[in-house]
Image (tube, grey):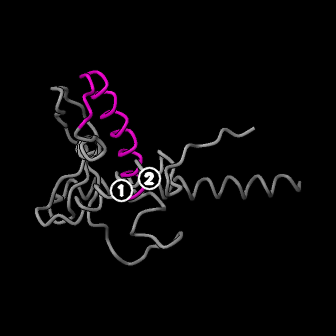
Amino acid sequence: MHKRRRRDRFGVTHHGYVTNVIRAVILELQESPNGVHISAGLVGERAFKRLRTRDDHLNVHLQWVSVQGCTYYARKELAAKLNPTSDESDAYQGNLFAGKLQTHYPVLQRVEHGDGSVTTEHVYIPLEQCTDAQIDWNVANMSRAARGLVEHVDALMAYKTSRRA
């Protein structure tokens, strides 16, 4: 038996609503004229601020957990939308390259969070701000993913052939 998801008066699930807020924050950051570096932490914090009401008096632990939850979903949305090896990227139509580059590309950076912690994570920076080394890093990752896919195809074809023998 499936558990019924709670929906608001417009028929949207809580997860769907939070995801829509996160997607809106990502889109606003992408379209920002200032060339913003987009991290999951930045998106998570901004999404949390939007989701909070003025009457929320969450203790610091609940605030932290809420921001971490938003950051988790932001990381998933960013990877789906802006990772060049994702089939949900704007650079692809189905499985084909759409002929246009993405607005932002991932790079690994140290990120300082509001709670004082520091992590290394993907930060998505505007294409125009990418250094040659950062472009080379993306090219290497995309090439590795493409080789892996071709090797998978070859292995599957070999299996099909050996099955008949």
Task: Give, as a single range, the part of the protein colored magenta.
Answer: 55-82
User: x, y percentage for residue 124?
Assistant: 26, 53
At a point 22% along the width and 44% down the height, the residue shown is 42
Q: Nearer the viewer, residue 135 or 120?
A: 120
Callout 1 amino acid: Arg
Sooner in the amino-acid sequence: mark 1 or mark 2: 1
Q: Say whether residue 104 is magenta.
A: no
Q: Position of residue 29 (x, y in %)?
A: 22, 58
What is the quadrant of residue 120 in the picture? Answer: top left
Give me the residue at 24% from left, 43% from top. Answer: 49
From mark 1 to mark 2, how far is it between C-alphas? 28 Å
Q: Quick check: 74 left or right of 115?
A: right
What is the quadrant of residue 127 in the picture?
bottom left
Tag 2: residue type? Arg
Sort mark 2 into few (<14), some (14-19) or many (20+) by Cα contacts within 10 Å.
Answer: few
According to the picture, the residue beneath numbered tag 1 turns out to be: 23
